[in-house]
Image: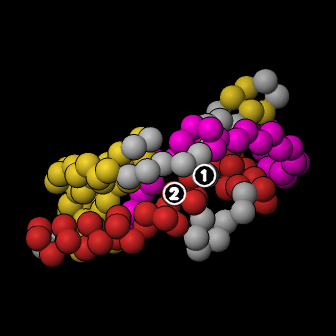
Amino acid sequence: MKGVAAIEVDKDRTFLSLASLKKGIFSFWKEIEMETDFEEDFLGFFKKNWERIEEKISEEEKKNYLKIEKIFVALPWYLERKRIVEDIIPLRKKKRIKSYDISISKKQLENIFLDWNDLCVHHIVLGYGIEDKVF
């Protein structure tokens, strides 16, 4: 069975949540609590504890007949950054702007200003503003 895992770090504990994935729908499986030492450096924490986390995931895969395909990590809020960018994006010649135009503009802005790569931590865009209107 296909599955996914989510990791959330809380100072001295790490929570590992498992879910099965069937037809694009997540079904919560179980949550495991692990004792860990968290330092202020989030990436350093993962380098130090990754083997234990990976071992626990493998153990649960074998026990529950899951194949974990994706792992999601809840990032701490102090890693949040806000970036304001501006660019001119040509739209169709019609004067009415529709949701299609906004979608195309969003995609173009993301491709220009966000650093996408294979090991990308996904960017969460909370809003787009155009002339005092937020989308």
Magenta residues (range) = 70-99
Colour scheme employed for the rendering of this structure: secondary structure
Q: Residue at x 60, y 51 (%)?
A: 41
Relative to 129, 46 lies left or right? left
Mark 2–mark 1 CB contact (< 8 Å): yes
Residue under the point 57% across and 60% down: 44
Question: 49 or 22: nearer the eye?
Answer: 49
| Element type where label 1 sits in the image | loop
Q: Amino acid at mark 1?
A: Asp
Residue beneath the point at 43% across and 67% down: 50
In three-dimensional space, the C-alpha distance between marks 2 and 1, rounded to whole angstroms, equals: 6 Å
Residue tagged by mark 2?
A: 45
At horizontal 38% and vertical 52% (from top left) the residue drawn is 36
Q: Where in the figure is residue 110, as x and y percent of width and height?
A: 70, 55
Residue to which mark 1 is pinned: 41
Q: Amino acid at mark 2?
A: Phe
Query: Is 68 displayed left or right of 60 in the figure?
Result: right
